[in-house]
Amino acid sequence: MRLNLPTLRPRSAGPVPAAVPASGRWFSRDEAIMGTAIHVELWGEDARTAEGAIDAVMAEMHRIDRLMSPYKSDSELSRINRDAGRRAVNVGAELFGLIERSLHFSRMSDGAFDITFAGVGHLYDYRSGVAPDASTLERARQAVGWRHLILDVGARSVRFGRDGMRIDLGGFAKGYVVDTSIAILRRLGVRHAVVAAGGDSHVMGDRRGRPWSIAIRDPRSPQRVVAVLPLQDTSISTSGDYERYFERDGVRHHHLIDPKTGVSPSALRSVTILADDGLTSEGLSKCVFVLGLQRGMQLIESQPGVDAVVVDAAGALHFSSGLAAASRATGAETRQ
């Protein structure tokens, strides 16, 4: 099934501009940072300025990786995981603010989003096909719970309230760095660009007179797409059970973990969220995936300016009311 929808853009965006005679060209670069594929593409008037802007984005990706990587022993996040079980750990304003924001997602989703999921998440090895046994998982689950993450706003410190706790910001770190990268490009005068970090991206402006076309892949067939969204000035995040996974005894173990059970939800195959910023779109994509279709869509409908495309376990496509209404209004075609 493939759906073509009309251009979606924030209320603040003006009409799509008419095509302008080209006085520059598109510049792009791909790198692997933060354990994922990074893609930057922008319109520039001259090579030196354009390449300098791309350099600035890649430098920002490396900066966030050094700050938040759970795999780098000298990152600020690793320092929290190493010491916060024994004492309060003072952290920088940026990371503290993100941890505070994570609690906002935890509250709104009744714990479906929880950065302390890492207490069980680290027990899975998707490359080697390793999952914890039942007793190990049960012990580890005792260390999971966002309400036991103790923040002191005045001291700007973080402390763990349970033994064995750890945190991982993978639930929205890529969306956040896409946001900061787009902000850098805007400051540098770039007006037309896309920045992507794995399943998280932001399209700025348009493609010089026409919208960006963003395809949502079929979760079970990477060569096929289930929807094409013409967009501008929008953040897009997709969370799917096909990104990092292994199967055993008919069960798909993937990196999207329900913090309450410590196992991978199976009701959905992918969730795509459209929002004004990447931190919101990525965070909500994780919330919806764990909550499931009904509760997840209820959450999306409660968030102004947010839309969703969901593929359920049977492969059926579902849309939030904003997208469904846009499709009906323009007679968009849906076909198998």
Image (cartoon, grey):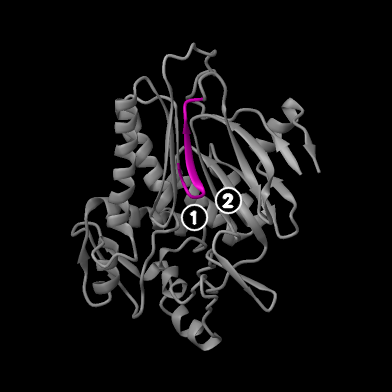
Type of amino acid under label 1: Met
User: Mark 2 packing: few (<14 Cα in 10 Å), some, or many (20+)?
Assistant: some
| Residue 20 image offset from top left, x and y in percent | 50, 12
Q: Residue at x 45, y 55 (%)?
A: 105
Residue in the picture at 54% in, 68% down: 258
Residue at x-position 21% and y-position 69%: 88
Q: Main secondary structure of the magenta part?
A: strand
Q: Position of residue 6 (x, y in %)?
A: 65, 28
**Label 2 sits on residue:** 299
Q: Which span is picked out in magenta?
A: 196-206
Q: Secondary structure at mark 1?
A: helix
Residue sitting nearer the eye, 96 or 203: 203
Position of the C terminus, as image quadrant, is: top right
* 248 vs 316: above or below: below
Q: Amino acid at mark 2?
A: Leu
Is label 2 in a helix, a strand or a loop?
Answer: helix
- Depth order, front residue of 209/37: 37
The answer to whether 223 is drawn above or below residue 111 in the figure is above
- Residue placed under numbered mark 1 in the picture: 108
| 2 and 1 marks in contact (CB < 8 Å) | yes
What is the crowding at mark 1: few (fewer than 14 residues within 10 Å), some, or many (at least 20)?
few
Which mark identifies residue 145? none
Position of the N terminus, as image quadrant, is: top right
* Side of 136 relative to 60 (left or right): right
Q: Which residue is nearer to you in this view: 89 or 69? A: 69
Q: Position of residue 17 (x, y in %)?
A: 52, 15
Give coordinates of residue 211: x percent, y percent.
57, 26
Q: Residue furthest bottom?
A: 135
Dividing the picture into quarters, in which one does residue 245 lie? bottom right
Residue occupying the point 39% across, 47% down:
176
